Image: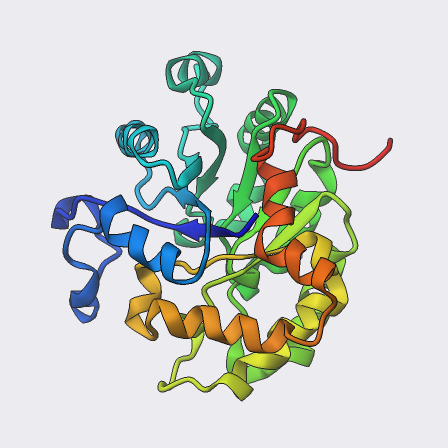
Amino acid sequence: MRIDAHHHFWHYQAADYPWMTAAMKVLQRDYLPGDLAPLLDSHQLTGSIVVQARQCATETEQLLRWADASPATQAVIGWVNLRQGDLAAQLETLRHPLLRGFRHQVQDERDPAAWLRDAATASGINQLQRQRYVWEMLVTWRHLPETTRFAAHHDNHWLVLDHLGKPDIAAGAKSWRKQVAGLAAMPHVVCKLSGLVTEVLNPPWHAEQLRPFIEEAIALFGPQRLMFGSDWPVCLLAAGYDEVVQLVEEVIGSLTPAERDNIWGDTAGRVYGLSGEQNGSIVAK
């Protein structure tokens, strides 16, 4: 099993994607399953996880339609208004065998720490975890302390840290290790090796600049709680798909075959239930 555990699709309309600034022209077009398919094939990736990029149920429904029509798309991480009182009804409306979890762009909230602490957030996450939906955490390094507290209170199902928590690359990997160590110590928290190339504030990036972050992630989480994600097409702001794959391949090349298999797909298979196994099994409690 070789899985790209993090990418996006969209029909581009400016009003729908306000986070795409004028500097992101490369993203301001359609990116669809047919565009991704040859990239997956070229790296022998047999499946993928598509992740929300808009905070609306309409996009989630569209992602599910694309996933139904695309054999390579094995799971969808959508969006739901988990702080709204009708969460159960929303989940019933969105119910679909390929819908395996949800994400909210917490990093874009006016006060991400307050959002993570809010009682309505906690109630919604508890309900999602009871129904065995994965929750993906999109935060930056600035929010890792509050994210750690959040994760400690929500341990009934998998939590996934996107993009290594968007490290402060300039501060270095040792600084990031201290910030993320608490999260990594929790067995229900998984981390995606994704999104690093776009976190370099003074491009161009180079492999030796990012290698230490991947090495620290391996040391902290272990290969069994890491998974590869391209973050395509967002990665195109800084690197081509081939470059993103090559970066991870080079860093994990010294691991055992079983360890590499975890990062390339087996972890994703367990977390998202891609191989037919019950994805609710996290740790013995």
Asked where in the image residue 269 lies, by quadrant, the reply is top right
Q: Position of residue 212 (x, y in %)?
A: 63, 80
For the point 40% across and 44% down, which residue is it? 51
Number of on-image labels = 0
For the point 51% across and 42% down, which residue is it? 115
Q: Is residue 46 above or below residue 65?
A: below
Q: Position of residue 2 (x, y in %)?
A: 53, 52
Q: Is residue 122 above or below residue 207?
A: above
Q: Judge by depth and name the residue closer to the eye, 80 or 223.
A: 223
Q: Position of residue 23 (x, y in %)?
A: 19, 71
Q: Is residue 27 above or below residue 280?
A: below
Q: Judge by depth and name the residue closer to the eye, 101 or 89.
A: 101
Residue situated furthest right in the rendering? 285
The answer, for residue 32, to whether it is visible in the render is: no
Q: Judge by depth and name the residue closer to the eye, 116 or 87.
A: 87
Asked where in the image residue 232 lies, by quadrant, the reply is bottom left
For the point 64% across and 48% down, which residue is it? 266
For the point 54% across and 80% down, which residue is it? 210
Left or right position of 163 against 63: right
Q: Position of residue 96 (x, y in %)?
A: 42, 20
User: What's the coloring here?
Assistant: rainbow
Left or right position of 59 against 226: left
The answer, for residue 149, to whether it is visible in the render is: yes
Left or right position of 153 against 22: right
Q: Judge by depth and name the residue closer to the eye, 261 or 185.
A: 261
User: In which quadrant of the rendered image does the C terminus lie?
Assistant: top right
